[in-house]
Image (tube, coloured by chain):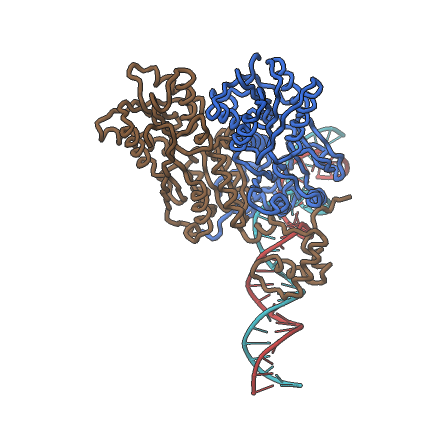
Chain colours: A brown, B blue, C cyan, D red
Amino acid sequence: MSQKVFVSAQEVADRAGVSRSAVSRTFTPGASVSPETRRKVVEAADALGYHVNHLARGLMRNESGIVCLIVSDMATPHRSGLIKALTQELQHSGKIAMLVNTDLLDGSVDLALRQAIRYRADASIILSGMPDKSITQLCLKNGQRLVLINRDDEQNGPLRINFDDEEAAGRVVTAFLRAGRRRLAFANSQAGTPSLMARENGFVAAARTHGLEVVVERYGWTSYESGRILAQRLLTLPERPDSVFCATDLLACGFIDAARHQFFIRVPDQLCVAGFDDIEQASWASYQLTTFAQPLAAIAREAVAWLEGSDAAKPEGRAHAIRLHADLVWRGSIRGG
Amino acid sequence: MSQKVFVSAQEVADRAGVSRSAVSRTFTPGASVSPETRRKVVEAADALGYHVNHLARGLMRNESGIVCLIVSDMATPHRSGLIKALTQELQHSGKIAMLVNTDLLDGSVDLALRQAIRYRADASIILSGMPDKSITQLCLKNGQRLVLINRDDEQNGPLRINFDDEEAAGRVVTAFLRAGRRRLAFANSQAGTPSLMARENGFVAAARTHGLEVVVERYGWTSYESGRILAQRLLTLPERPDSVFCATDLLACGFIDAARHQFFIRVPDQLCVAGFDDIEQASWASYQLTTFAQPLAAIAREAVAWLEGSDAAKPEGRAHAIRLHADLVWRGSIRGG
DNA sequence: GGTCATTTTGCAAGCGCGTGCAAATGCCGC
DNA sequence: GCGGCATTTGCACGCGCTTGCAAAATGACC
């Protein structure tokens, strides 16, 4: 038994004694149904356990309500925070998130975007490596909207959301100088994504305007472990840095731990540290990391608003870029807030 | 222009000079197509940028390939780790994850399950509050498979995956005793989910067999901040505990930080701490937390395997429970490994 | 009651696809 | 060349839904 699993609109119609159109209209906001008919339909639907089939609806409307989240390293605090904000915002506006993990696939992002196309996702939000240009073109040609978060690029068409990374980096330099530091260092991963590089370049440039040269070190990907390695490299230098800006909070946590437990260096007395992202751990008592808060909720809001807006609807819609401000969060890892 | 966005099988058929069935069969594994026809179809499909419409396919096959992940607190290290493992495993077997965030909705899980039904998800995996019994019944009646992870319950029908929490708790008692501790405490959240309570009860019971009474404190939900509060309560007791088992690593991190930075208590010399989950932060140098590793990959594998298996297919299939073993990970937060 | 404007309703077509069935094709041995 | 068989192909129907259109119902007004 139980082969005929889902109940269809037809069955509801039969039970309510109306036409199938009537039940369809009942569940379509803004359609014309008399209160009486609606009542009968709702009643029958409840009794039968009817749920509109969004697959079929999407087929007709040519609009699935699905938004594809394409992300790597999703277990990372910052990424998971962003995913949370996005899913919340999407659900809030009646859409649903489809999650694609690009960690172990080969042509990862491209493959993922293909998946998005197959399910006729209305849009894709990418928090992962850069997709191939040909693929983004394919998406756009297929009427998909595209949002790139924190992966600035000259791509045309999609919405790009970024931060004022350079400006933030400049503020770190100021803070370090004010704390009396002169031997600045920058700890980066080798990922080389645009936003990471922007922080690095901004930091180096700002230091230079004060006549200071920054020691830059890059290693691995953006992780706690990389932070430790970077600390081992930078803190064994003949001219040991007295302040370091880590491209990411995760790097900063690893850096601080290595500095403290391995080199017995006191933060912030002997070493000032700044990070970026304001992940939860940055506020933990062991780190007290001064960092920049990415307004995740704002990112999510901007992204979803754009998806709903008419701008995105234009097939050849102007590429749109949003630059958000990252707030400096003062904590104990820099002397003299 | 660009109104006719997606290319259909018909267009591919026309271009390839074959029937629409042929192109459908080309993209259906195991269907009968001659190599020659297949070649022509693939060629035309590539040229046109054709992608099978999974919405329509799901409609026909009555099987969408969508699995719904219903989760709260998804930004938490443990949850995000689980999500990552699940998405990976799902994609590996050709399915796709739909992510539902139940953080701010009211009838959260129920609403989410309705969403899952609407999109005709083949299954739902729940890592969130307990769904109403009526809703799970609805899911099952609609042919959905259900997996509950870490929320043991007497529900019938779905697959339940849990850990040997009691046994693990017993091992912590042994470890504490071996480290010479006698004043044991248990720090829990007020969430009261079955697995948390199992840890608590197992711990208390095991201690009792050694003639020891455990001080139990519960506060808030399972977070770093709650861990701090719990520390403030437990460490100001007249008979200060010398060892504490925290129901969760997140609690343990907060506990350790408060003990160390607020009460200047040395871990593990003056206080032994154990946690559960083995989140990434547990291995960080500041915590060195002895804890239990939940084999996330194994959980994911079991869940997905069950979804694919024939067991799940039986409409009135026997409720199935899997109890996995959590490995003890020895680190520095308990003296004398 | 009759006319007309306004809502409500049902019909039927069609979204893109899978698949059973029968016709067509190819291949083999005689 | 022909019958028998296996494979491939096309036709046509249906999955569950939305929606334009025209018919039916309702109501307002004279």
Q: Position of residue A50 (x, y in %)?
A: 68, 52
Given residues A45 and A335, the one toward you in this image is A335
As drawn, the residue found furthest toward the front would be B238
Q: Position of residue B256 (x, y in %)?
A: 51, 24
Q: Indicate whether B109 appears above or below B278.
A: below
From the viewer's perspective, tell me whether residue C29 is left or right of residue B17. right
Residue A67 visible in the picture: yes
Q: Indicate whether B105 appears above or below A189.
A: below
Q: Indicate whether A289 appears above or below B45.
A: above
Q: Position of residue A217 (x, y in %)?
A: 34, 22
- Residue found 59% across the figure and 13% down from its top: B179
- Residue found 28% across the figure and 22% down from its top: A183
- Residue found 40% across the figure and 37% down from its top: A293
Q: Position of residue A168 (x, y in %)?
A: 33, 35
**Dividing the image into 4 quarters, which one contains the N terminus of chain A?**
top right
From the viewer's perspective, tell me whether residue B198 is left or right of residue A223. right
Given residues B137 and A332, the one toward you in this image is A332
Residue B57 visible in the picture: no
**Dividing the image into 4 quarters, which one contains the C terminus of chain A?**
top left
Q: Quadrant of residue A220?
A: top left
From the viewer's perspective, tell me whether residue B41 is left or right of residue A160. right
